Image: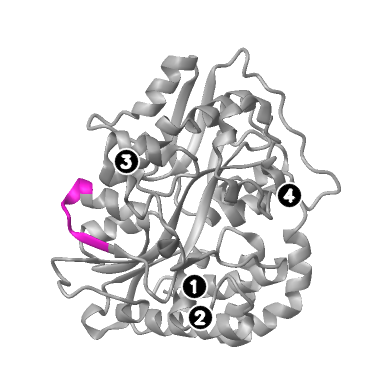
């Protein structure tokens, strides 16, 4: 089998390269990584320079533009391929938005832009939406610009539970875009009896037809939860490596066909995979576009809960324009319009009430406006130390490379 390229993150790549050379096992890799992880973690917690990059001068007054990099299926789109809320924003403000589905997963996107970020250069995007843990990395490294909250009056509508987070106290550098669950889905035509747990993905009838996400925290979070681990609580190497062993076996035995980011959707559509670990809103949209073929559930033993967040890269010359964009999307009526399409959890208070005017069924959708019982089935993957992030990513990436 042709070997896959090394991970984009050089620190993870170094660990995996060492593991290849030594032909180490997964558990040995984790133990070996612990020795070098302290030094690597120091590198992960700094920019590699004594000084952090300087924010670009803001040209928003003279340049009415926002270049927005986001994930696929993550904004409202009409039958003609237009973005209704973006078109309305441009009509209201005169600011043109160049919207690109450039993010497939957090690590691959970071790998493409990290060198420019370290130099304070323009990466070609003014707004980027990334997941909590990756946003925390950008903030630590000094790769983001501080938001002027006075330019975002609708930020008063941010849900209280999201106003102060560990990776960005006071929300000085980031603002949530959408949140969601990772759970499991299956093709209802091919699997009429359905699935109830991650363990069901390993059934013999699904050999070679299972997909899992390349987002470590989601795939490992679901496997660990299935094994009885509270992923938001006190766990360590033993629990993580037990789950790595499960994933490694399913990959090496051919049970898992693909490990992908957002591209997993195509595998479901063409039926290369019949069941998968997936993100909640994607399945609603796939059903709308391709017929009601898939069912999504958060397993009773637990799924993951996360948010993707706006940030302004350090080299962007359009920060004030981005702040106007964020303010626009924090209008509850606009947030409800987006939620009606993307079917992810909106962070905007008042959006549920606005959604009632669009569609009462929408306002009662547990994937968009989850109640306490639904939220209780999901956990946020606990914050990792720098050393843990390096060694756990190395073990996970080692499986990706060998798959």
Dot 4: element: helix
**Disc 3 packing (10 Å; few <14; some 14–19; many ≥20):** some
Circle 2 sits on which residue?
244
Between 2 and 358, the one nearer to me in the picture: 358
First in sequence, mark 3 or 1: give its number: 1
Quick one: label 1, few (<14), some, or many (20+) residues within 10 Å? many
Question: Do callouts 1 and 2 mark residues in contact (Cβ within 8 Å)?
Answer: yes
Quarter of the picture holding the C terminus: bottom left
The residue located at (72%, 60%) in the rendering is 44
Q: CA distance from mark 3 to mark 1?
A: 28 Å
Q: Which residue is mark 4?
A: 141
**In whole angstroms, how far apart are the C-alphas of marks 1 and 2?**
7 Å
Residue at (45% x, 61% y) in the render? 372
Residue occupied by mark 1: 220
Along the viewing direction, whichever of 357 and 230 lies nearer the viewer: 357
Q: Residues within 10 Å of mark 2 (few under 14, many from 20)?
A: many
Q: Secondary structure at mark 3?
A: helix
Q: Quadrant of residue 309?
A: top right
Going from N to C along the chain, the mark reached first, 4 or 3, is 4
Residue 301 placement (x, y as % from top left):
42, 76
Q: Quadrant of the N terminus?
A: bottom left
Q: Position of residue 384 (x, y in %)?
A: 66, 67
Residue to which mark 3 is pinned: 341
The residue shown at (28%, 48%) is 285
- Which quarter of the figure has residue 271? bottom left
Between the C-alphas of marks 2 and 4, the distance is 29 Å
Q: Which residues are magenta?
A: 288-295
């Amino acid at each position: 089998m042709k070997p896959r390229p090394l991970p984009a993150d050089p620190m993870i790549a170094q660990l995996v390269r060492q593991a290849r050379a030594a032909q180490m096992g997964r558990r040995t890799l984790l133990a070996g990584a612990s020795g070098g992880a302290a030094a690597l973690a120091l590198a992960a917690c700094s920019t590699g320079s004594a000084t952090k990059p300087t924010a670009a001068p803001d040209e928003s007054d003279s340049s009415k533009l926002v270049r927005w990099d986001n994930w696929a299926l993550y904004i409202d789109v009409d039958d003609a391929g237009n973005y209704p809320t973006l078109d309305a924003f441009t009509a209201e403000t005169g600011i043109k938005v160049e919207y690109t589905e450039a993010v497939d997963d957090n690590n691959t996107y970071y790998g493409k832009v990290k060198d420019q970020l370290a130099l304070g250069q323009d990466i070609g995007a003014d707004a980027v939406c990334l997941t909590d843990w990756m946003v925390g990395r950008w903030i630590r490294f000094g790769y983001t610009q501080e938001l002027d909250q006075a330019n975002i009056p609708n930020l008063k509508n941010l849900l209280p539970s999201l106003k102060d987070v560990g990776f960005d106290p006071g929300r000085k550098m980031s603002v949530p875009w959408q949140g969601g669950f990772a759970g499991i889905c299956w093709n209802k035509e091919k699997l009429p009896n359905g699935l109830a747990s991650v363990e069901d993905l390993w059934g013999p009838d699904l050999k070679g037809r299972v997909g899992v996400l390349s987002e470590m925290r989601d795939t490992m979070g679901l496997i660990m939860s299935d094994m009885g681990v509270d992923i938001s609580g006190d766990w360590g190497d033993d629990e993580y490596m037990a789950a790595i062993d499960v994933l490694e076996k399913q990959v090496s035995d051919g049970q898992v066909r693909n490990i992908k980011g957002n591209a997993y959707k195509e595998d479901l559509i063409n039926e290369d995979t019949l069941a998968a670990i997936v993100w909640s809103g994607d399945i609603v949209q796939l059903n709308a576009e391709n017929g009601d073929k898939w069912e999504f559930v958060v397993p009773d033993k637990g799924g993951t809960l996360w948010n993707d967040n706006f940030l302004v890269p350090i080299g962007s010359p359009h920060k004030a324009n981005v702040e106007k964009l964020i303010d626009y999307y924090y209008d509850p009526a606009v947030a409800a319009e987006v939620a009606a399409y993307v079917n992810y959890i909106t962070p905007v208070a008042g959006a549920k009430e606005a959604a009632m005017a669009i569609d009462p069924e929408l306002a009662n959708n547990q994937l968009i406006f989850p109640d306490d019982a639904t939220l209780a089935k999901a956990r946020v993957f606990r914050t990792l130390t720098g050393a843990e992030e390096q060694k756990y990513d190395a073990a996970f990436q080692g499986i990706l490379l060998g798959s």
